[in-house]
Amino acid sequence: MTKVYKSKIGIELVIPLILIFGTVLFLFVSEKRSWIGVAIILPVIFFVIHIFATTNYTINGNSLIVKSGFIFNKTIDINTIKKISETNNPISSPAASIDRLELLYGKYESVLISPKQKQDFINNILLLNPNVEVKFKKYSSTR
């Protein structure tokens, strides 16, 4: 079974980025010698768009592959996942929204993700590892 979950793209991250990049781009364009600034900011804007567009979570067999552009690519054995809980932790992570899930796995490792279809994602993880403890408002399990 291979299932790909796209990251939810949160307006709480998009609006500040549009305001920041829009303001900087406007300031560069309004200057007389702005081509250097525009040449610098446009690749940064395209990089951020690329990261948002390519952030996804793939369940393939007993593996969860967390990918965000070419920056983050991690494979997690689903059998090592201990807990899934909701969080709004804003720490940098492979998630394009603040509406996140924290996965605790391995000995002391964790990752924050933001699948669009949280419930479906959790259900598929539980099919592969029914021992996962889930702390989610629409689904609560302490197995």
Image (cartoon, rainbow, N blue to C red):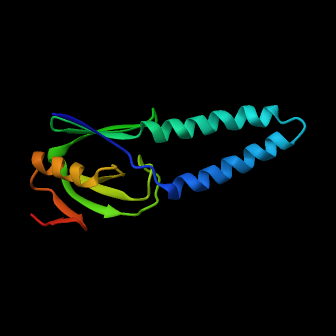
Q: Is residue 15 left or right of residue 36?
A: left
Question: Which quadrant of the structure image shows residue 75?
Answer: top left
Residue drawn at x 41%, y 40% as measured from the top left: 55
Asked whether the viewer can see residue 108, the reply is no
Q: In this view, does 39 lie above or below 138?
A: above
Residue drawn at x 79%, y 32% as measured from the top left: 36
Q: Where is residue 77 in the image (x, y as percent from the top left)?
A: 20, 41
Q: Where is residue 45 in the image (x, y as percent from the top left)?
A: 62, 39
Q: In this view, does 28 lie to the left or right of 110?
A: right
In the rendered image, which quarter contains the N terminus? Answer: top left
Residue drawn at x 35%, y 63% as measured from the top left: 87
Q: Is residue 123 above or below residue 53?
A: below
Q: Spot the residue most to the right.
A: 32
Q: Which of 72 and 48 is in front in this view?
A: 48
Question: Which quadrant of the structure image shows residue 78?
Answer: top left
Number of marks drawn: 0
Q: Position of residue 21 (x, y in %)?
A: 67, 47
Asked whether the viewer can see residue 138, the reply is yes
Q: Is residue 54 left or right of residue 108?
A: right
Q: Position of residue 128 (x, y in %)?
A: 11, 45
Q: Is residue 9 above or below residue 83?
A: above
Q: Is residue 138 left or right of residue 53?
A: left
Q: In this view, does 95 lie above or below 36?
A: below
In the rendered image, which quarter contains the C terminus? Answer: bottom left
